[in-house]
Amino acid sequence: MARGNPAPSPARRRPAGAAKAAERARVEEIFARLAAANPEPKSELEYANPFTLLVAVVLSAQATDAGVNKATRALFALADTPARMAALGEAALAEKIRTIGLYRTKAKNVVALSQALIHDYGGEVPDDREALEALPGVGRKTANVVLNVAFGEPTLAVDTHVFRVANRIPLAKGSTPRAVEDGLVKIIPARFMRHAHHWLILHGRYVCKARAPSCARCVIADLCRYEDKTV
Ligand code: SF4
């Protein structure tokens, strides 16, 4: 008699395979609909070049994009390169961004990262994750946004909106941003990866909101398994 677990019969294998195929089709359809609703999603942070994008993303930690844009319009008119930002200096920068949370720490980091870009990268923003994450104030999320938005790489930054939406629909459940990022990268079809980050952020910000999701006008409501959908 054979030892161990018997191989599942074809009849038992089919439902698991069918369930996986159905889940793949569900994820595909979710992104197809988000893409159809907004074919070319854009970052809501205002920036003029990779450097100002990097600075805007660093400033956006625990702040709204609208709040960051309000402060950076005047700031970037004065300092839109690492050399100009370093020359502006920490005190003057802090004054320009004092409406943004944690502005003192952020001013310190932005000046330090500007100096690092001048010294190590000839004043350019590197298109390399390791190099980006080594800059002061730059973590995985910021590096993912810069790689995606400035350099067109298929990275996926998990912010509060992406984290909530991914767990809620669900697309990829996880208790940490990194777990959700890894789960999403595994399931999102390659052709949607370039814009997946923005589709999920915008969906979370304007439709699948934290307190009261607008399920009645949600284009993926029939594909969502959230138990507390609003009618
Ligand atoms: S149906 Fe509601 S909970 Fe589900 S994704 Fe849409 S807005 Fe979010």
Image: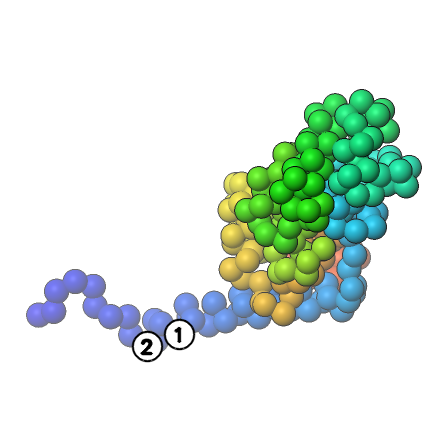
Q: Dot 2 lies on which element?
A: helix
Location of residue 114 with respect to 89 vertically, above or below = below
**Residue kind at label 2, given as amino acid type:** Pro
Viewer-side residue, 4 vs 63: 63
Display colour scheme: rainbow
User: For the point 69% across and 35% down, which residue is it?
Assistant: 115
Mark seen at residue 88: none
Location of residue 200 with respect to 52 vertically, above or below = below
| Quadrant in which residue 85 is drawn | top right
Location of residue 120 with respect to 136 vertically, above or below = below
| Quadrant in which residue 84 is drawn | top right
Across and down, in percent, residue 30 comes to 66, 64
Q: Dot 1 lies on which element?
A: helix
Mark seen at residue 14: 1
- Specify whether residue 212 is in view: no
Labelled pair 2, 1 in contact (Cβ < 8 Å): yes
User: For the point 57% across and 39% down, which residue is it?
Assistant: 134
User: For the point 79% across and 51% down, which residue is it?
Assistant: 49
Are there few (<14), some (14-19), or many (20+) residues within 10 Å of tag 2? few
Asked if residue 7 lies left or right of residue 210, the reply is left
Are there few (<14), some (14-19), or many (20+) residues within 10 Å of tag 1? few
| Quadrant in which residue 101 is drawn | top right
**Residue kind at label 1, given as amino acid type:** Arg
Residue matched to label 2: 10
- Specify whether residue 120 is in view: yes
